[in-house]
């Protein structure tokens, strides 16, 4: 069932009711029925949403835009808000609540100079990106519906408009808190905090403590980024308005997955200083948490904020090490293990080797119980790796299982999404559907994962994108 979103009760300082102005000739192209049932939506609900978007029927829904601010590339911007998106309601499954969010449904009071539209290419990127991340077991928003349209919108060139419906546990961003903090509106800031306590069962254990709430957000943010690093995910626009309270990967723009391992990789062409490079992501996660800490500073002392931020570093380092330990198929951590991991990464960097494939290939090294590489440096490393494994007394099968369940066969590459986009512009969504199927389990070997693990041609490698969408 879809209910009116409870966030509307917070009033017009928080939200603004908006009549969507849908792109012309919207056509539902994809629908994620597995996700629908997981979040408590039945076929009638899905039909209602479709009628609402395509036939503009269903007057029960009360869509609205939310006000938020945020730090964009380190600079505070006092009013962002949903300029091209609307929350249309929420659904429930067990004791959990889920947001339903339209993206690309026309202008809102927060559109500034924008047209309120999302283009086909970036909507496809978001749709695939989120579902792939889910398959890769990284917390993320999800993709429920994809609509094409016949409308053209002006960007660098004319583009086709499209619309998606995404779901997430919450659309409350760090920037929602910053919005009230920098307006000196402590009363509404407190109202927002109380809303979090009242709405989300995840925060029940905080017992109304803002310090505990902050710690929980910091914890989930640190864990999310440790997962990004382990899978080679680069977000591209880690502004505080793109971080939510549950550490869900969110607002997919010019993201990428590492291909040739390069810690300095910057996936966003608009990020000229490399603020959001792969190697910087952990620091930016901390920076964003400290921006959130500032927004809580009317309620927390400086030392409470600082101690919680120290906790970020602890959680992040611990989770990162565990993730990489699993990637090597080890069950315990020994003193030399961080060096062993770093030495492998250094070789991948020096020799421009594919991050995803190189880790997955460790499965073969373990299976054969002998080095597989013809490259002398990598061979020497594989010998140390096998020696280290000799000290881990679990069975070979268990080691193989750990490696294969921690290292996917595929991650979505920009050159592949480009091909999906070219077909979609011609009205053909078959490769997109195939790709989505592949990400239902990117860790197992089958025809689909084999197809999407084919390497790019030289001129298709390591593609970067700009912010334009
Ligand atoms: P994003 O880059 O999607 O995180 O968006 C940053 C801010 O710009 C948010 O406030 C968006 O709502 C707004 N925005 C981005 N694109 C558009 C657009 N085409 N029309 C209106 N607002 C937009
Ligand atoms: Mg955003």
Image: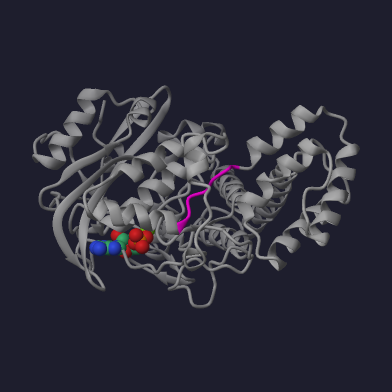
Tell me where residue 414 appears, x and y as whole percent. 44, 58
Tell me where residue 18 appears, x and y as whole percent. 16, 50
The quarter of the rendering in which ligand 2 is drawn is: bottom left
Nearest the eye: 59 or 423: 423
Point 37% across, 53% down: residue: 125
Q: Is residue 326 left or right of residue 301?
A: right
The quarter of the displayed image where residue 417 is located: bottom left
Nearest the eye: 394 or 314: 394
Task: Decide whether residue 211 is among the magenta residues.
Answer: no
Does residue 82 lie above or below 146 as drawn? Answer: below
Point 42% across, 52% down: residue: 173
Q: Magenta segment range?
A: 408-414
Point 30% across, 37% down: residue: 6
Tell me where residue 424 appears, x and y as whole percent. 27, 51
The quarter of the displayed image where residue 265 is located: bottom right
Q: Is residue 280 left or right of residue 177?
A: right
The quarter of the displayed image where residue 395 is located: top right
Nearest the eye: 277 or 61: 277
Tell me where residue 301 appears, x and y as whole percent. 61, 56
Task: Decide whether residue 413 is among the magenta residues.
Answer: yes
| Type of colouring | one colour
């Amino acid at each position: 069932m879809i209910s009116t979103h409870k966030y509307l009760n917070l009033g017009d300082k928080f939200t603004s009711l908006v009549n969507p102005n849908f792109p012309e000739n919207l056509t539902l192209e994809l629908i994620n029925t597995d996700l629908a049932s997981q979040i408590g939506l039945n076929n009638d609900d899905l039909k209602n949403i479709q009628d609402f978007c395509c036939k503009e029927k269903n007057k029960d829904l009360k869509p609205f835009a939310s006000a938020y601010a945020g730090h964009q590339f380190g600079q505070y911007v006092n009013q962002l808000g949903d300029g091209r998106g609307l929350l249309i309601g929420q659904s429930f499954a067990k004791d959990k609540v889920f947001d339903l969010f339209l993206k690309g449904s026309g202008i809102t009071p927060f559109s500034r100079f924008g047209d309120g539209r999302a283009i086909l290419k970036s909507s496809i990127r978001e749709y695939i990106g989120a579902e792939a991340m889910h398959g890769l077991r990284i917390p993320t928003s999800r993709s429920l519906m994809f609509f094409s349209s016949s409308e053209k919108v002006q960007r660098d060139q004319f583009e086709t408009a499209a619309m998606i419906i995404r779901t997430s546990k919450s659309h409350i961003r760090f920037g929602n808190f910053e919005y009230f903090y920098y307006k000196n509106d402590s009363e509404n800031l407190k109202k927002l905090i109380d809303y979090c306590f009242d709405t989300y069962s995840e925060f029940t254990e905080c017992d109304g403590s803002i310090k505990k709430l902050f710690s929980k957000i910091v914890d989930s943010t640190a864990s999310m980024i440790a997962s990004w690093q382990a899978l080679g995910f680069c977000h591209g626009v880690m502004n505080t308005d793109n971080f939510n309270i549950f550490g869900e990967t969110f607002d997919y723009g010019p993201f990428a997955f590492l291909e040739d391992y390069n810690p300095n990789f910057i996936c966003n062409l608009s990020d000229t200083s490399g603020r959001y490079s792969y190697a910087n992501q952990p620091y930016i996660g901390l920076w964003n948490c400290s921006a959130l800490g500032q927004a809580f500073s009317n309620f927390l002392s400086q030392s409470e904020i600082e101690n919680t931020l120290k906790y970020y570093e602890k959680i992040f380092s611990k989770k990162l090490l565990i993730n990489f330990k699993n990637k090597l198929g080890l069950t315990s951590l020994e003193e030399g293990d961080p060096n062993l991991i770093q030495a492998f990464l250094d070789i991948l960097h020096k020799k421009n080797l594919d991050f995803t494939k190189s880790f997955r290939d460790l499965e073969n090294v373990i299976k054969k119980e002998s080095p597989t590489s013809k490259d002398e440096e990598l061979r020497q490393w594989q010998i140390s790796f096998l020696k280290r494994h000799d000290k881990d007394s679990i069975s070979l099968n268990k080691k193989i299982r750990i490696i294969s369940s921690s290292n996917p066969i595929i991650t979505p590459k920009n050159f592949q999404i480009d091909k999906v986009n070219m077909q979609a512009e011609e009205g053909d969504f078959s490769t997109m559907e195939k790709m989505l199927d592949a990400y239902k389990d990117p860790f197992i070997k089958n025809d689909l994962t084999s197809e999407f693990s084919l390497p790019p041609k030289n001129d298709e490698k390591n593609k970067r994108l700009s912010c334009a969408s």
